[in-house]
Image (cartoon, grey):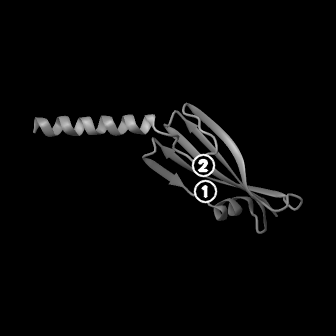
Amino acid sequence: MKKVTVLFSLSLISAAYLSLTGCQIVASPMAGGIYNETKYGDVATTHNSATKEGKACGTSILGWVATGDASVSAAKAAGGITTVASVDHSAKNILGILGEWCTIVKGS
């Protein structure tokens, strides 16, 4: 039983170490191992008709648990948008512990 406890403890420590030393836990065009907060465009048609903005986010903890709805449809609903003019994204990562991925939709 003692060997099983030691092996289990080592596997937990290894998993924790790998999750904290790996890449950031949210996608971004730039890497920031300690801190990353970036915003970047994905799809754009015309910004002239963009009178509203909606944002939808998901979060990740240690890269182990991720929750939220960062879809375009959720962002449209949040901003009351029916016609999409542009879709942007933002990503935030703090020490690989807390991550946030957002979709930002502009339109009318």
The reply, left or right, for residue 44 in relation to residue 12 is right
Residue 70 in the image, given as x and y percentages of width and height: 60, 56
Picture layout, residue 9 above or below residue 74: above
Q: Which residue is mark 1?
A: 70
Q: Residue furthest top?
A: 34
Q: Residue furthest left?
A: 1
Picture layout, residue 75 above or below residue 2: below
Q: Residue furthest right?
A: 48
Crowd class of label 1 (few under 14; some 14 to 19; many from 20; radius 10 Å) = some
Element under disc 1: loop
Residue 95 in the image, given as x and y percentages of width and height: 52, 33
Residue 54 in the image, given as x and y percentages of width and height: 72, 56
**Amino acid type, residue under disc 2 in the picture:** Trp
The reply, left or right, for residue 46 in relation to residue 57 is right
- Number of numbered discs visible in the structure rendering: 2
Crowd class of label 2 (few under 14; some 14 to 19; many from 20; radius 10 Å) = many
**Residue at 31% in and 34% down:** 13
**Residue at 76% in and 69% down:** 82
Picture layout, residue 102 above or below residue 31: below
CA gap, disc 1 to disc 2?
Answer: 7 Å
**Amino acid type, residue under disc 1 in the picture:** Ala
For the residues labelled 1 and 2, say whether their Cβ atoms are less than 8 Å apart: yes
Element under disc 2: strand
Circle on res. 81: none
Q: Looking at the image, tell me whether mark 1 or mark 2 is earlier in sequence order.
A: 1
The reply, left or right, for residue 10 in relation to residue 39 is left
Quadrant where the C terminus sits is bottom right
Q: Which residue is mark 2?
A: 101
**Residue at 59% in and 35% down:** 32
